[in-house]
Amino acid sequence: MKTAIIYYSKHHGNTKKLLDALEEVKAMDLIDVCNVQKQDLSNYDMIGFASGIYYGRFQSGILKFAEENLPHGKKVFFIYTCGAKRKGYIDAIRKIAEIKKAEILGEYACLGWDTFGPFQLIGGIAKGHPNEKDIREGIAFFENLLSMWQD
């Protein structure tokens, strides 16, 4: 199963740390939206979108990339890191996927060190995350996705 994950991971590299662990499980293409804004994704069987959470949603470059590049009818999944877990973080990316008639396979979320805005004053929240447990759980999520589609 040919897989790509489109990601944004800038501040502390939380999301990229998780993706690097997934890449050890299965070869895939990691596409950084800071470097690539246009990409033909039609040859991928499964497409992931990964980001830290900014103002309650995926980073804006990820959303724009999905709107402009996600082909109709693809299998997609979402991975994100956040300072605190709350509902609704995937609403915007989910809506784009639904418009594109994508099959949403699932989501994985874990804490990530967050020093954005006022959290900077106190040294951040969720320091030390993603930790080994978070990474193991992310790998288990990804392996489960892969096992659903193996022949």
Image: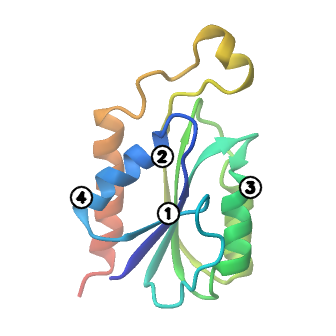
Q: Are marks 4 and 3 in contact (CB under 8 Å)?
A: no
Q: Where, quadrant-wise, is the N terminus in this rendering?
A: bottom left
Place of residue 106 in the rendered image (x, y in percent of width and height, measured from the top left): 49, 63
What's the residue at 56%, 20% (across, down)? 125
What's the residue at 60%, 62% (across, down)? 33
| Amino acid type, mark 3 | Ser
Distance of label 3 from label 2 (alpha carbons): 15 Å
| Amino acid type, mark 1 | Gly
Closer to the eye: label 3 or 1: 3
Distance of label 1 from label 4 (alpha carbons): 20 Å
Disc on res. 60:
3
What's the residue at 72%, 78% (across, down)? 68
Disc on res. 15:
2
Disc on res. 24:
4
Asked if residue 61 lies left or right of residue 48, the reply is right
Q: Where, quadrant-wise, is the C terminus in this rendering?
A: bottom left
| Amino acid type, mark 4 | Glu
Q: Is disc 4 surrounded by few (<14), some (14 to 19) or many (20+) residues within 10 Å?
A: few
Asked if residue 90 lies left or right of residue 106, the reply is right
Q: Is disc 3 surrounded by few (<14), some (14 to 19) or many (20+) residues within 10 Å?
A: some
Image quadrant in which you'd find residue 46:
bottom left
Distance of label 4 from label 3 (alpha carbons): 27 Å
Place of residue 103 in the rendered image (x, y in percent of width and height, measured from the top left): 56, 79
Closer to the eye: label 2 or 1: 2
What's the residue at 71%, 48% (across, down)? 57
Q: Mark 1 points at which residue?
A: 106
Q: Do the residues labelled 1 and 4 touch (CB within 8 Å)?
A: no
Q: Are marks 2 and 1 in contact (CB under 8 Å)?
A: no
Toward the viewer: 138 or 8? Answer: 8
Residue found at the far top of this picture: 122
**Mark 3 secondary-structure assignment:** helix
Q: Which of the two discs, 3 and 1, labels the residue nearer the N terminus?
A: 3
